[in-house]
Amino acid sequence: MKVVLQNLTRIFPSRNKKSGEEVIAVNDFTFEIPDGKLIGLLGPSGCGKSTTLYMICGLQKPTSGHIFFGDDDVTELSPENRGVGLVFQNYALYPHMTVKQNILFPLQNLKGDDKLTKEEMLERAYKVAKLVQIDDLMERKPSELSGGQQQRVAIARALVKMPRVLLLDEPLSNLDARLRLQTREEIRRIQRETGITTVFVTHDQEEAMSISDMIVVMKTGIVQQIGKPQDVYDDPVNLFVSKFLGTPPINVFDGRVENGKIYIGDDAVLSVSGVEDQPVTVGIRPEGFVLDENGPFHCELKSVEVMGRDVSVVSTNAASQNPVIRSIINADNKVDTAAGTVSYSIKPHKIFIFNKETEERIRFEVK
């Protein structure tokens, strides 16, 4: 099912009666979610991603704009008539019911032509339980399940209605690190097997990038960038997107462009063309550093952290906006830990420059 968001805006009235300033949670959001794809809505708390999800499912009504499922305008349609499955952050399972009863519950409320026989409901419940691999837990109650198992029950309950669209609101937030990894892989598997158009809301960029076909990066209600995860990581449109994506995060410096060179402090780190002389903000991805004793960029060495196949070199530089600089290099490279400084060459496709005022990306060509 293709989902189209057309100029979607949601404004909340001010809680401060004196100022009277309205809060724009989502601002003119236009996007087409392709049929059968998994889309990640990504951004920090308060960026409007959950509000967007709730407008898609009908729990909140847009102030302006339209929502289409296929060719159907569902903007004014009630949630129960939209054909959506919603999985909440806290699972929202009924504690007094067994797993089977929790999954059956949405089917028992179907009416009219959609009403199913008891045998049909059981068949469908066991089918989705097998899909999410909890068919051997059907007689247990939620209190007898692990967090990951409870999450699977919540997904099964959402899927049992055979929704046109599946909506997941930070579904992994309550799980520990290992379960998060396992469950996000399960979500991706389930989505691929069912082919249901899915919208996945998270503030965790690693989650979004690992399982999404496309990501939408949001900030204060405004869409910053839309694209395939790797494309957005490799080609951010502004400083916010570059800083939000990446673990470890991008290293940010005060810099300038002068006579066709990018300077960080006194170091001319790269020769470029097509950019006027100006102060800039420079971003370098951790994997963009190449250990080079004759390299143009010099930092003060602090420590070396061995991570198996890679090594994280921790250093500082007076022009850095980060407390420390993290450089990820291959473990085959030997860092002289006794030296006070470390020198690098910079990979041209891993360095970005941004306008000091607008924070928009400035494109350049490498000489």
Image: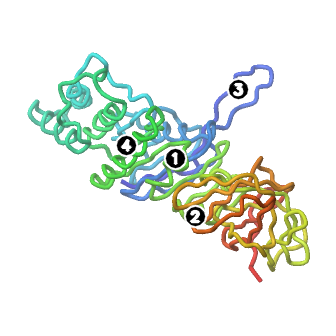
Closer to the chain start, of discs 3 and 1, is: 3
Q: Mark 2 points at which residue?
A: 331
Residue at position x 72%, y 56% in the image: 251
Answer with left or right where residue 139 lies relative to residue 53: left
Q: Mark 3 points at which residue?
A: 14
Mark 3 residue crowding within 10 angstroms, few (<14) / some (14–19) / many (20+):
few
Q: Which residue lies most toward the left here?
A: 119
**Front disc: 1 or 2:** 2
Secondary structure beneath dot 1 equals strand
**Front disc: 3 or 2:** 2
Whether 346 is drawn above or below 106: the answer is below
**Which residue type carries mark 3?**
Ser
The quadrant in which the C terminus is found is bottom right
Closer to the chain start, of discs 3 and 4, is: 3
Whether 9 is drawn above or below 297: the answer is above
CB atoms of marks 2 and 4 within 8 Å = no
CB atoms of marks 1 and 2 within 8 Å = no
Closer to the chain start, of discs 2 and 4, is: 4
Camera sees residue 153 = yes
User: In the rendering, which numbered label is found on residue 345?
Assistant: none
Closer to the chain start, of discs 3 and 2, is: 3
CA–CA distance in space, label 3 to label 1:
24 Å
Out of 217 and 337, give the one closest to the viewer. Answer: 337
Answer with left or right where residue 227 lies relative to residue 281: left
Q: Position of residue 230 (x, y in %)?
A: 54, 63
Q: Name the residue under label 4.
A: 183
Q: Name the residue under label 1.
A: 66
Closer to the chain start, of discs 1 and 2, is: 1
CA–CA distance in space, label 3 to label 4:
38 Å
Residue at position x 65%, y 48% in the image: 222
**Which residue type carries mark 4?**
Thr
CA–CA distance in space, label 1 to label 2:
52 Å
